[in-house]
């Protein structure tokens, strides 16, 4: 019965996604649909997008290993969403015709700035899709008994199919369905799992010492702060979330939807983390990567288990389709179009975007197979974004001073700072290289921008004054 429920659900999602893609005729529709969604739809699609394999299965894994401190670190992401809702989302009314992150960068940093942003958008999105693809393989293996590679091919194949055909319209519609399923299934798993383990107090008694303490036995306060900042900065203004800022009917709806999404993530991260705690209490010798699947498989009754498995699959699909769309849109709009001397027709742009969607999906499969931990894939992918793009992009949205020189200097300092701290020094004191990279970018960006503006503001001497 569980298998039938999952198969029917997958077929339903595939059909809905493909059907919703009818009528998509341009890259703009593929990227941001009709730009008239309400705050509740933005809330659902944004929440479904970021609640992926890393923030669910990956969170359960890390809490199983290191304790509840990982939930606290993930709340950095929640704070980021709240800050975006407060300070950035209201400003989206200034960009009625933009469809990608590169569109935001082009007016301030020129064509080259847009292309660079597009390149790193594709790297980031492919890495995050890889995290979801890796989670998909484990889900199919544990629940359906299918080899991980075949699970990846089946699950990712469905996502690639409907996101390629339907674009953002298919992504939003399937996200709403997927969010509804996971919103019921994941909390239900925790409730039943706690009951199966004898209640919350019994779970706490079965835990190793320090698993409920902050920062715990495996982390210092400085390392916790670093990880918190990594999650706060790592996915800030990444392409799929920027696209969500463009699809609302107005900036007020966009800001409300973003705020609701940030608020709901706080208890959701706690729920997925506590599932890892339940798994530890039930099976201390379990492979941590299987923490959430184990609780679902061993504590839920037949039928209900099938619904929850569908919810877990929804978690992965809803994140993968958003980042696939972000990568495809960024590749065509921010890289291909600026490099061409002659404009492409609408049909050609759309076909290229669909091809890019397919290629990124295949690349993500390769990426997922090479790295074991889902959450580690996310942190690795973050290094292609925040230290290079975040500071100059935030400066544009917050209407700060910007110069091309500041963009290049900050990007160079950011990537050098990240590599030096992470690769050469080995992340001393547990501080992530991403945090150091963003700090280096910010310092150089501000210094260079101020220097350029000071030179522009210097009074120009006439020839007589100069001779005297």
Image (spheres, helix red, strand yellow):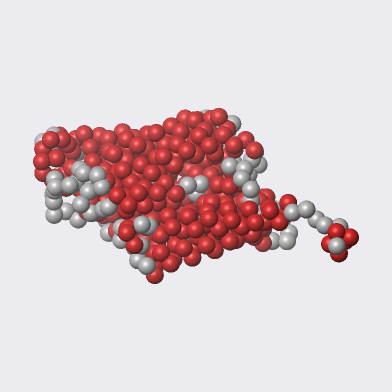
Classify 359 as above or below 397.
below
| Residue in front for this viewpoint, 467 or 32 | 467
Residue drawn at (74%, 54%) of the image: 458
Q: Residue furthest bottom?
A: 424
Residue drawn at (73%, 51%) of the image: 457
Q: In the rendered image, which quarter is residue 114 located in?
A: bottom right
| Residue in front for this viewpoint, 111 or 142 | 111
Q: In the rendered image, which quarter is residue 131 located in?
A: bottom left
Q: Position of residue 79 (x, y in %)?
A: 41, 39
Regarding residue 425, the answer to whether it shows in the image is: yes
Q: Position of residue 235 (x, y in %)?
A: 45, 49
Side of 339 where 121 appears, left or right: left
Q: In the rendered image, which quarter is residue 365 located in?
A: bottom left
Query: Looking at the rendering, in which quadrant would you find the C terminus?
Result: bottom right
Q: Residue furthest right?
A: 464
Q: Position of residue 78 (x, y in %)?
A: 40, 40
């Amino acid at each position: 019965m569980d298998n039938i429920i999952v198969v029917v659900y997958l077929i339903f999602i595939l059909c809905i996604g493909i059907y919703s893609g009818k009528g998509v005729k341009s890259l703009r529709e593929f990227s941001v649909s009709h730009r008239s969604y309400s705050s509740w739809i933005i809330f659902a699609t944004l929440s479904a997008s970021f609640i992926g394999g890393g923030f669910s299965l990956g969170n359960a894994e890390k809490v199983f290993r290191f304790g509840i401190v990982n939930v606290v670190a993930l709340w950095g992401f929640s704070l980021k969403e709240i800050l975006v809702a407060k300070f950035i989302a209201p400003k989206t009314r200034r960009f009625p015709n933009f469809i990608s992150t590169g569109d935001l960068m082009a007016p301030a940093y020129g064509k080259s700035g847009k292309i660079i942003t597009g390149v790193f958008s594709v790297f980031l999105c492919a890495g995050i899709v890889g995290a979801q693809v890796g989670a998909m393989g484990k889900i199919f293996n544990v629940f359906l008994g299918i080899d991980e590679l075949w699970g990846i091919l089946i699950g990712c194949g469905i996502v690639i199919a409907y996101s390629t055909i339907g674009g953002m319209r298919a992504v939003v519609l399937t996200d709403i369905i997927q969010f509804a399923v996971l919103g019921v299934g994941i909390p239900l798993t925790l409730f039943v799992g706690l009951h199966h383990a004898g209640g919350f107090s019994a779970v706490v008694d079965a835990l190793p010492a320090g698993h409920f303490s902050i920062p715990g036995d495996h982390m210092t306060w400085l390392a916790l702060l670093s990880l918190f900042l990594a999650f706060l900065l790592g996915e800030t203004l990444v392409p799929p979330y920027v696209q969500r800022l463009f699809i609302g009917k107005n900036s007020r709806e966009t800001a409300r939807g973003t705020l609701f999404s940030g608020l709901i993530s706080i208890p959701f991260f706690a729920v997925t983390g506590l599932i890892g705690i339940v798994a530890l209490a039930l099976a201390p010798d379990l492979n941590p990567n299987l923490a959430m699947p184990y609780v679902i498989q061993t504590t839920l009754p037949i039928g209900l288990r099938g619904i929850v498995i569908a919810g877990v699959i929804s978690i992965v699909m809803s994140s993968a389709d958003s980042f696939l769309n972000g990568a495809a849109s960024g590749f065509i709009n921010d890289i291909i179009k600026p490099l061409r001397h002659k404009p492409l027709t609408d049909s050609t742009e759309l076909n290229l975007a669909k091809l890019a969607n397919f290629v990124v999906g295949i690349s993500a499969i390769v990426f997922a197979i090479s790295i074991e931990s889902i959450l580690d894939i996310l942190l690795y992918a973050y290094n292609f974004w925040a230290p290079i793009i975040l500071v100059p992009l935030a400066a544009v949205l917050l209407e700060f001073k910007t110069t091309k020189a500041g963009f290049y200097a900050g990007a160079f300092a950011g990537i050098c700072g990240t590599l030096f701290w992470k690769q050469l020094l080995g992340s001393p004191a547990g501080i992530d290289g991403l945090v150091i990279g963003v700090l280096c970018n910010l310092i150089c960006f501000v210094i260079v921008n101020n220097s350029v503006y000071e030179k522009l503001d210097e009074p120009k001497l006439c020839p007589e004054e100069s001779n005297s």
